Amino acid sequence: MGIFNFLKKAIVGEGSQHNTVSYTKSLPNESISYSIDPILLKKFPNGLLPGELVLINWIEGKTINAKYPRYFETTYGIEAKQSLEKLQNEGYIKEASPIESLTALKLPELKGILKTKELKLSGKKADLISRIGENYSSDEIESFIENRMIRVTDKGKKVLEEYYYIVPAHRYDSKDGVYNVANAIRHVSKLNYKPGNGDISWALFQRSYMEHAVKFQYGLMTIDIRNMAEQLRREKR
């Protein structure tokens, strides 16, 4: 048996393509269709969806009325606002205090608050926030804040640590269907140990390279090599 035939039997048999769930969303002037990997619609034992873990990380430091990226719906199949309500009710996120929420304001807005008591306006953002905290009550500060900032709770941080590979797979998605959240979940689920994030992406890139090699798809092999080179660059190796 030639080496490529062996690799084709051992590696390609796993398959890198998966069935998807198709959705069509009707808007006033258009209809949008998109496909979602079914593994992204499967809840973890704690009841959270993969996209909700991405959302916990994304919402930190933002307000509840932030503009949500479309990928929450089109890639992960979740309605961000509904999932945020769930995450807050279950204690993964919470509203920050009024003073903590000041960090979501811009410098001109902070200076506008200080002007109401004719206080000093110079300094960095942290200096302005500290000055407001020293001279305004919590109720006064809250009156200047339209929406409180969202913070991740200890419970939220713990679940992100438990599923440590989700956010990096989202952040460094290779955009070619090789390294992403869905495939990271599949890869980790087959192991009886916790691989490093770099090990997960490297294994997926190598497998993809060999799948393309046995089919003599040299252009796709080049993309795989570039992905591996980009990982080495990012890791400064």
Image (tube, helix red, strand yellow):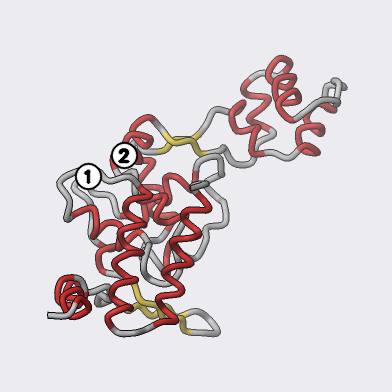
Q: Residue at x 20, y 76 (%)?
A: 3
Q: Could you tell me which secondary element the residue under label 1 belongs to?
A: loop
- The dot on residue 159 is 2
Alpha-carbon span between mark 1 and mark 2: 9 Å
Q: Residue 133's spot in the image, x, y percent?
A: 68, 19
Image height of 124 relative to 223, above or below: above
In the rendered view, does 15 fall on the left or right side of 90?
left
Front in this rendered view, residue 13 or 154: 13
Q: Residue 46's spot in the image, x, y percent?
A: 22, 44
Image quadrant where residue 91 sits: top left
Q: Are marks 1 and 2 in contact (CB under 8 Å)?
A: yes
Callout 2 amino acid = Val
Image quadrant where residue 36 sits: bottom left
Q: Residue at x 27, y 56 (%)?
A: 185
Q: Residue 49's spot in the image, x, y percent?
A: 29, 54
Front in this rendered view, residue 56 or 165: 165
How many badges with numbers are in the image? Answer: 2
Image height of 124 relative to 50, above or below: above
The residue sitting at the left extreme is: 1
The residue sitting at the top extreme is: 134
The residue sitting at the front extreme is: 2
The residue identified by callout 1 is 46
Image height of 50 relative to 174, above or below: above
